[in-house]
Image: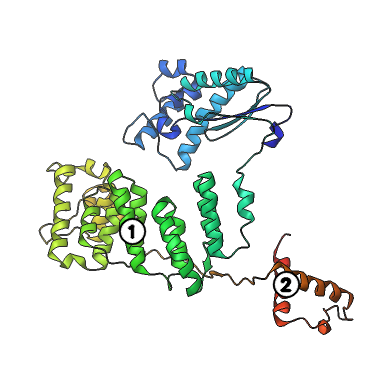
């Protein structure tokens, strides 16, 4: 990126609005074969039309938007945007710019070029039903810096005690409002195993951060697992309730799923009210986890829980089966994963007469079941083999200076074996520090 600076005076950063959600699947053949040819020939003789149909089939036949997070969507997005790149380069052969997914970094010599380039990019994107995020257009004047300014600042905190490091992380986030700062800080302490006293200094802050940033649950869960012996489950339960309360009404499915998964892996008992809220949420993956919890804890023996499951059974039957339990289309609806796992694990078998056996009535899913295919692993175990135990030695600048002075003298007093002569009367603490510094030097690139 820095090689593009050269004699350019301005950097322009652009972002495509809601990129994956805005991709129009018909624009795929437009990008491959040109819009004119694709509109003329809509048969599968054009490879772009085949891709168009495939992407629609992945998303219930929708033409607006493609699924986010899989490799295929990334490839499809590149097919479209590489075509956009080509048109931009045709308009500005000498333009210095780079694109990462849907983010553009453009370098120009004067303000007049800014308006020209942005205007052309708008026009090219519109040909493929895409638009710029006008609120994210940023212009910077030379001299430029690439990357996040907080990265170097955070590196300067790494030597601090973990509780102080965490406070510095929060302060840096409050200054920059970038969630990546919190993510970076959590990853630094992710595999550290703390003593009980150290954990007490961190626990409340970590739980508060989890409630504030539940999208980072995959990191928090590891931290909690590594230090499970000191973790107060009562505090974890309160946090789970808060996350569910804050996110369930707004259909923030991922956050709710992680909260219920945390209930599962830490074997937490939660109230019937929260069980009911999840079962009635239509967040199918959260419901799957909750049904697994109900079975594992044998909660079906409670009449209130059995009634709740019966209501779910009836709701599914009325809404999805349309009174035809043999309708093969049922398993191709958005409830297929729940239907498959509920059938396989007998989660919704209410009675001998009222059993949930719908997946096995579909030939495709029946074959998957016969082959023992699982999509959900309720017995998943976190493989945390050797947590890092942080055993730092903290000293003052004066103490460190004194040790270095003795160390300098010791270099002049090496014996024939090449070992440091301890005739200089180093204390045990000083010897321990020198040994720690020596080990760190052997393990480090510095």
Q: Residue furthest left?
A: 353
Q: Position of residue 84 (x, y in %)?
A: 54, 24
> Residue 41 falls in which quadrant of the image?
top left
> Residue 42 falls in which quadrant of the image?
top left
Q: Name the residue rendered at 28%, 61% in the picture.
A: 292
- In this rendered view, identify the residue nearer to me: 228 or 341: 228
Q: Nearer the viewer, mark 2 or mark 1?
A: 2
> From what the image shows, is residue 90 above or below residue 294?
above
For the C terminus, the quadrant is bottom right
What residue would you read off at disc 2? 399
Q: Is residue 263 left or right of residue 157?
A: left
- Of the numbered discs 2 and 1, the one sitting upstream in the chain is 1
Q: Secondary structure at mark 1?
A: helix
Model colouring: rainbow
Q: Is residue 60 left or right of residue 419?
A: left
What residue would you read off at disc 1? 240
* Res 1 seen here: yes
For the N terminus, the quadrant is top right
Q: Secondary structure at mark 2?
A: helix
- In this rendered view, identify the residue nearer to me: 12 or 344: 12
């Amino acid at each position: 990126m820095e090689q593009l600076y050269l004699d350019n005076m301005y950097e322009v950063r652009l972002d495509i609005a809601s990129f994956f959600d805005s991709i129009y699947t018909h624009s795929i053949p437009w990008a491959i074969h040109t819009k004119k040819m694709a509109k003329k020939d809509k048969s599968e003789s054009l490879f772009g039309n085949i891709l168009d149909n495939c992407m629609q089939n992945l998303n219930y036949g929708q033409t607006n938007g493609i699924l986010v997070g899989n490799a295929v969507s990334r490839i499809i997005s590149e097919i479209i945007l590489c075509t956009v790149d080509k048109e931009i380069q045709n308009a500005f052969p000498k333009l210095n710019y780079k694109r990462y997914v849907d983010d553009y970094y453009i370098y120009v010599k004067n303000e007049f070029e800014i308006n020209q380039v942005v205007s052309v990019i708008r026009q090219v994107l519109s040909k493929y039903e895409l638009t710029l995020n006008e609120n994210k257009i940023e212009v910077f004047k030379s001299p430029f810096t690439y990357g996040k300014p907080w990265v170097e600042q955070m590196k300067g905190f790494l030597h601090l005690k973990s509780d102080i490091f965490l406070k510095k992380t929060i302060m840096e986030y409050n200054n920059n409002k970038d969630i990546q700062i919190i993510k970076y800080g959590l990853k630094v302490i992710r595999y550290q195993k703390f003593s009980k006293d150290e954990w007490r200094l961190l626990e409340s802050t970590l739980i508060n951060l989890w409630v504030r940033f539940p999208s980072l649950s995959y990191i928090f869960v590891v931290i909690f697992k590594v230090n499970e012996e000191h973790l107060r489950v009562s505090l974890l339960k309160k946090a789970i309730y808060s996350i569910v309360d804050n996110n369930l009404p707004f259909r923030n499915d991922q956050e709710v799923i992680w909260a219920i998964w945390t209930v599962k892996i830490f074997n937490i008992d939660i109230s019937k009210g929260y069980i009911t809220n999840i079962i009635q949420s239509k967040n199918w993956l959260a419901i799957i986890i909750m049904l697994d919890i109900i079975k594992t804890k044998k909660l079906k023996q409670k009449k209130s829980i059995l009634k709740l499951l019966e209501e779910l059974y009836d709701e599914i039957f009325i809404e999805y089966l349309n009174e035809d339990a043999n309708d093969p289309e049922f398993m191709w609806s958005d409830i297929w994963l729940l239907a498959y796992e509920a059938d396989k694990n007998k989660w919704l078998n209410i009675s001998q007469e009222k059993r949930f056996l719908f997946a096995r009535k579909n030939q495709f899913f029946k074959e998957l079941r016969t082959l023992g295919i699982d999509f959900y692993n309720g017995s998943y175990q976190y493989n945390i083999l050797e947590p890092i135990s942080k055993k730092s030695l903290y000293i003052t600048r004066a103490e460190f200076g004194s040790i270095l002075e003795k160390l300098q003298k010791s270099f002049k007093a090496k014996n024939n074996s090449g070992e440091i002569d301890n005739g200089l009367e180093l204390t045990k603490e000083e010897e321990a520090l020198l040994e720690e510094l020596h080990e760190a030097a052997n393990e480090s690139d510095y």
